[in-house]
Image (tube, rainbow, N blue to C red):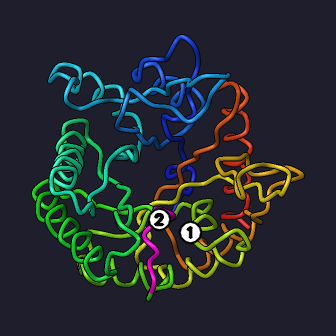
Amino acid sequence: MNIEEKIGSSSIVFHQRPELPIIDAIRLCKDAGFKAMEIHLDDWNGVFGDPSLIKFPGVWPRTCSKEEREALREELADFSTIIVHGTPWDVKIASRNPGIREESVKQYMEAIEFAHDIGAGIVTFHINGATNPLEEYCETMERIVDFGKRAVEYAQKYEIILGAETGTGLVAPGATPIEKWHNVLNGIGSESFGMLLDIGHVLVEMGYRAGTEAVLTYINEFSDKIVEVHAHNVIAWTAVSQILIDHQPFFGDTVCIDVEKVFRKLREVGYNGPIIFEIVGATKEKILKECQLAKQKIIEIWNE
């Protein structure tokens, strides 16, 4: 396998003021030499502020016309791998509130339709957790599994692979994070539905004392279920208000994941899916350089 064909970036790294149109972000990703790209499905949010929110390039399917979808499909045709990532903001497919649950599921079904229109082969989601801390774990799990089965049935007609992202707050009394994921994936029970292994969010999920070994455990446990990898590093540092700050460059004095061990383990277990960078910083130019450095390191590891 030529690993370079699988490495790319999420659209969230291309933030700037004024906001960059998604089609320009696609061209920047292509010009940077990446062969894979993930399109984030919202054009109204962001992950970085200076000091207020800077929106990243994205797409809101309900305002993206047939002609615009065709233009995106044409621009993306040069990529070997295209992924659509459903918005994580304000959606909750396991909500106890039936209205919120219905709208959340609708948005994710629309993500599948949009992916088909632009030629993407993978769609990923955030599955979230319980609405109420007193809720029975089995109730939350039942709603998640129901969503997964419905999504698989809908995606099958397009031969689209689905995945749920790690670190989305599902942990509840009576289940460890590892048990939770076995319950989700075994409950849905489809080869077309797997895990989006976000290596930074694994630490969020496992707790602030987690580190590289937690990521390696996930890889060992779910090696045959990983459909995509989100690649970035994490700061675990008492001098910040948050316990963990993710979406960091691969290398630095304060990051705590040994990315070389992680990608050697992925190579060892035979992972052959996309590796998408979610590295965020002050300027898209600087972050593209960090992504290119990370790409070279992954290629070196794969070719050892």
Residue position for label 1: 205
Q: Does the magenta stretch include residue 88?
A: no
C-alpha distance separating marks 2 and 1: 7 Å
Residue 169, label in figure: 2
Residue 50, image x, y percentages: 67, 22
Residue 259 percent location from the top left of the image: 73, 62
> Please, which residue is most extreme toward the top here?
18
Q: Residues within 10 Å of mark 1 (few under 14, many from 20)?
A: some
Examine the rendered structure and indicate whether residue 95 appears above or below residue 14.
below
**Position of 284 relative to 18 (above/below):** below
- Residue most extreme to the front: 134
- From this view, report whether residue 213 is shown above or below residue 166: below
Tag 2 and tag 1, C-beta contact below 8 Å: yes
Residue at 45 percent of width and 41 percent of height: 37
Give the mark nearer the N terminus: 2 vs 1.
2
Q: Is residue 303 above or below residue 24?
A: below
